[in-house]
Image (cartoon, rainbow, N blue to C red):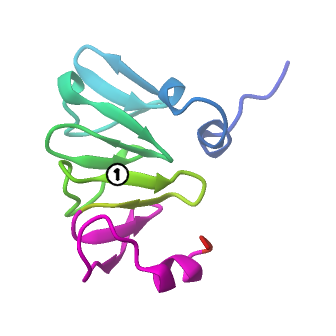
Amino acid sequence: MARAPSTAEACGLGDWRRLYSEQGGEVFCGRFRIRGAEARTFQVLGGGYSRDLHHVFYFSEKVPGADSGSFEVVDRGHRLAMDRNTLYRHGQAVERLSREPGVWPDETLRGLGRD
């Protein structure tokens, strides 16, 4: 019998949407319920990130302080995302952005492995 892939393996390959499911109005990432996720407005963004109308999630955890309305994933492979104020890597805030929204700080990306 073949071994089931770990969550990390499953999340690193293929279509991100396969990792997420909805049951009885609740949203799941694998077998973990995403607390506070609104199934009606839930969207899978990729790179482990998802959002609903009010929250941003990294796998099954809320991303504290992230702005759902302006949140975007920019590099799925490096798990980089941003909202209008903050750069995120692996669901954690990296720095507050001091430039205009949508402009990546080049020096930060070089330090995170994205050239």
Q: Which residues are magenta?
A: 84-112
**Where is 87 relative to 46, above or below?**
below
Q: Which residue position holds label 1?
A: 72
Q: Residue at coordinates 40% horizontally, 22% vertically from top-left?
A: 21
Left or right position of 93 against 64: right
Residue lying furthest right: 1
Residue 91: image quadrant is bottom left
**Where is 96 relative to 55, above or below?**
below
Q: Residue at coordinates 58% horizontally, 29% vertically from top-left?
A: 15
> 2 or 15: which is nearer to us?
15
Tally of numbered discs: 1
Residue 17 in the magenta stretch? The answer is no
Q: Position of residue 32 (x, y in %)?
A: 41, 35
Residue lying furthest top: 24
Q: Position of residue 68 (x, y in %)?
A: 20, 49
Helix, strand or loop for disc 1: strand
